[in-house]
Amino acid sequence: MTFDNTTFFRETSQSRYDLFVAHIKNGGTCYALADAEGCLNVSIGSERVLPVWPSEEMANEWAKTEHEGFSALDVSNESFTDIWLPGMANDGVSVGVAPNMAGEGIVVQASELLQDIQG
């Protein structure tokens, strides 16, 4: 599945979430942002959130706005569903699914995202 950034980011947060879930269900790879210290986590209130996107280009574009020094980290489908999401659930880290350039997106518990992917 290929994504056009301009069209994708114009979608509602719910549409981007649904497209992301479908992408992962179909075996797609996702991308987080990382630097030498590790993955980017943003704070929303008291919540730690890991933003993820369905394409490398989207992740890198988002990094340019406020997170210089970070670049897209390819997370295989198997790693994301078998290791990352369960680990994030254990650590209390939420997932920011495909935030747009304004930072708007659905934030969900890792276990809930995993259920939606497996459902």
Image (cartoon, rainbow, N blue to C red):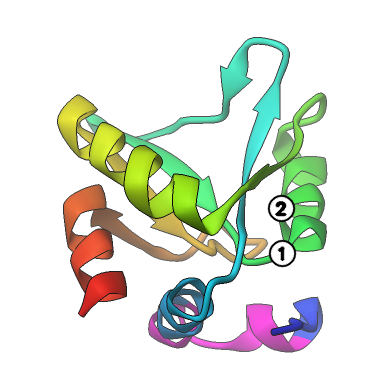
- Which circle, 1 or 2, is nearer the viewer? 1
Give the magenta-colored segment's residue range: 7-16
Image position, residue 39 (x, y; %): 57, 27
**Label 1: which residue?**
55
Residue at left 17%, top 30%? 90
How packed is label 1: few (under 14 Cα within 10 Å), some, or many (20 or more)?
A: many
| Label pair 1/2, CB-CB below 8 angstroms | yes
| Mark 1 residue type | Ser
Q: Nearer the viewer, residue 1 or 46?
A: 1
Residue type beneath disc 2: Ala
Task: Locate the C terminus by quadrant.
Answer: bottom left
Q: Which mark is residue 108?
A: none
Residue that label 2 marks: 59
* Position of residue 47 measured from the top left corner of the image (x, y, whole percent): 25, 34
Residue sitting at x 27%, y 62%:
113
Q: Is residue 16 above or below residue 95?
A: below
Q: Residue at image x 76%, y 83%?
A: 2
Quick check: is 119 in the magenta stretch?
Answer: no
> Could you tell me what secondary structure mostly forms the magenta stretch?
helix
State the image coordinates of residue 27 (x, y, percent, origin top left).
Answer: 53, 72
Does the magenta portion include 8? yes
